[in-house]
Image: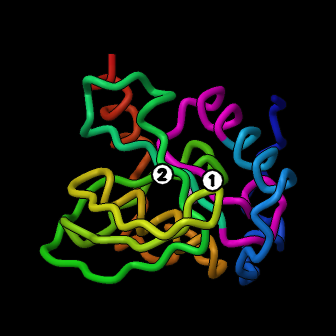
């Protein structure tokens, strides 16, 4: 278990396309375990491997709709994920651990179905709605070098950020 350094906007690694995972070995499991620790420590809802400097198609997403689960239990590990269907639309605030302090308004599907492999190479599908659907899209975008700032209709102003922070308290 170890924390990894989160790369920030301006680091060219975040703009690169990641390669699929082919070996479901100890190295992958260590990466996933470290990503879990790093995400929980950073208090985020999702993390993609390129954010910790690894150009492989690996993401973790927290299913925050499952309120009965602990944060640790909410984490879904997705290897070589693909969105196989999406429907509906949601427009709302989005941020990223690699773009600290910046939030934008982004439109995403309301519901997505993702097919992926688990850490042992076994295929599964998982559905997400609301924030979880947004998070699947956001993290999978990272694997192709896309940041939410490219997708944002606009970035929140300092006044709106202040308002948002007030609401959080
Ligand atoms: Ni992100």
The residue depicted at 41 percent of the width and 36 percent of the height is: 74
The quarter holding residue 70 reads: top left
The quarter holding residue 89 reads: bottom left
The residue depicted at 52 percent of the width and 71 percent of the height is: 140
Which residue range is magenta in the image?
Answer: 36-57
Callouts 1 and 2 close, C-beta under 8 Å: yes
The local crowd at label 2, few if under 14, some if 14 to 19, many if 20 or more residues have their Cα within 10 Å, is: many
Q: Nearer the viewer, residue 83 or 135?
A: 83
* Residue most extreme to the top: 169
The quarter holding residue 88 reads: bottom left
Question: Is residue 83 found left or right of 33 in the rendered image?
Answer: left
* Residue that numbered label 2 is attached to: 95
Name the spot of residue 68 as percent of width and height, x first.
26, 23
Numbered disc 2: secondary structure: loop
Does label 1 point to a residue whose CB lies under 8 Å from ligand 1? yes
Name the spot of residue 35 as percent of width and height, x first.
70, 43
């Amino acid at each position: 278990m170890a924390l990894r350094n989160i790369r920030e906007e301006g680091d060219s690694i975040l703009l690169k396309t990641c390669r699929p995972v082919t070996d479901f070995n100890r190295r992958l499991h260590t990466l996933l375990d470290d990503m879990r620790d790093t995400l929980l420590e950073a208090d985020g809802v999702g993390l993609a491997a390129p954010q910790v400097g690894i150009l492989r198609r690996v993401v973790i997403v927290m299913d925050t709709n499952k309120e009965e689960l602990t944060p640790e239990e909410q984490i879904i590990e997705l290897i070589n994920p693909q969105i196989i269907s999406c429907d509906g639309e949601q427009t709302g605030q989005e941020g990223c651990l690699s773009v600290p302090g910046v939030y934008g308004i982004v439109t995403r599907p309301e519901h997505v179905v993702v097919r992926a492999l688990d850490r042992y190479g076994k295929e599964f599908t998982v559905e997400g709605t609301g924030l979880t659907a947004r998070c699947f899209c956001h993290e999978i975008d990272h694997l192709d070098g896309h940041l939410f700032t490219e997708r944002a209709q606009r970035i929140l102003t300092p006044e709106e950020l202040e308002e948002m922070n007030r609401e959080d308290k």
